[in-house]
Amino acid sequence: MLTAQSKNYLSFIRSLPIKEQYSKQDLLIEDLLLAREGQLEMYYAPHNEYINPLAKIVIVGITPGWTQMERAYQAAAKSLHRGETEEEACKAAKIAARFAGSMRTNIISMLEALDLPHYFGIEKTSDLFDAKSNLLHTTSLLKYPVFVDKQNYNGHVPSLLKSEFLYEKVLGSFPQEISMLGNPLIIPLGKSVETVLHRLIQQNQIKTENFLWGFPHPSGANGHRHKQFEKAKPEMIRRLRYFQMK
């Protein structure tokens, strides 16, 4: 269900000119600003409005980055200009934006190495972002894009758990979203996401045991991801087998 606030932002998107690419000057503007504290800014983006409650796999990041935000706006604007509903526009934005770019490529590569398709009866992992997208839900601890001085927030500076401003944003949306998803396999992307999830579990904000702990953050900037992946791989495979047997 879209809120009145979301509908207002989607009306704004409807008024945007169609472009092959939007710039930060187009989108990181006061009209789309949700909240600000110092150099931290959170902006509206439409793709995490869409939730797939039937998903069997959920991939959780920290926050949508600029690439995701920009692609979400492209897809939503084109959808609305075609006369589609706001809900359809949000779904189109989700499909186009989820972990767009090199992050998606790296996620697919690592999940293939874990033989994930075998456990979910699909041919290849890339199908989750295409023909078998009904099995996948992607989301972020922070529902909307957060930037530090207009650059992607990485979960570290400031620490998400030490920032009252950011942690309140997590509590305001993430536990409610997870509660709508049944009992899927949840794949946290990196240690920063894992740390926050452990805190949420300790506080009884979320209740599920189906986590694939140890999955590295797939950003190309994470130069240690290959080593991290190989170290965690045996335990992740064990968890996948356990999940399949449940």
Image: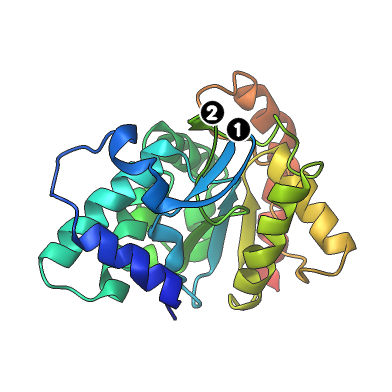
At label 2, the amino acid type is: Asp
For the residues labelled 2 and 1, say whether their Cβ atoms are less than 8 Å apart.
yes
Is 158 in front, or is 122?
Answer: 158
Where disc 1 sits, the SS reads: loop
Outermost residue, right side = 202
Q: Earlier in the sequence, mark 2 or mark 1?
A: 1
Is residue 100 visible to the viewer in this orientation of the structure? Answer: no
In the image, residue 32 above or below residue 90: above
Residue occupying image coordinates x 67% and y 65%: 172
Circle 1 residues within 10 Å: few <14, some 14–19, many ≥20: few
Which label number is shown at residue 149? 2
Residue 97: tell me if it is visible: yes
Q: Of the residues shown, which amino acid type is indicated by label 1?
A: Gln
Q: CA distance from mark 2 to mark 1?
A: 5 Å
Q: Which residue is more in the foreground, 204 or 124?
A: 204
Q: Quadrant of the N terminus?
A: bottom left
67 shown above or below 98: above
Q: How far from the left and from the top, in percent, is residue 105?
A: 40, 36
Residue 133: x and y in percent read 37, 63
Image quarter hosting the C terminus: bottom right
150, above or below 117, in the image: above
Give neighbour class at mark 2: few <14, some 14-19, many 20+ (Cα, 10 Å): few
Q: Quadrant of residue 143?
A: bottom right
Left of 90 or right of it: where is 232?
right
On residue 39, which mark appears?
A: 1
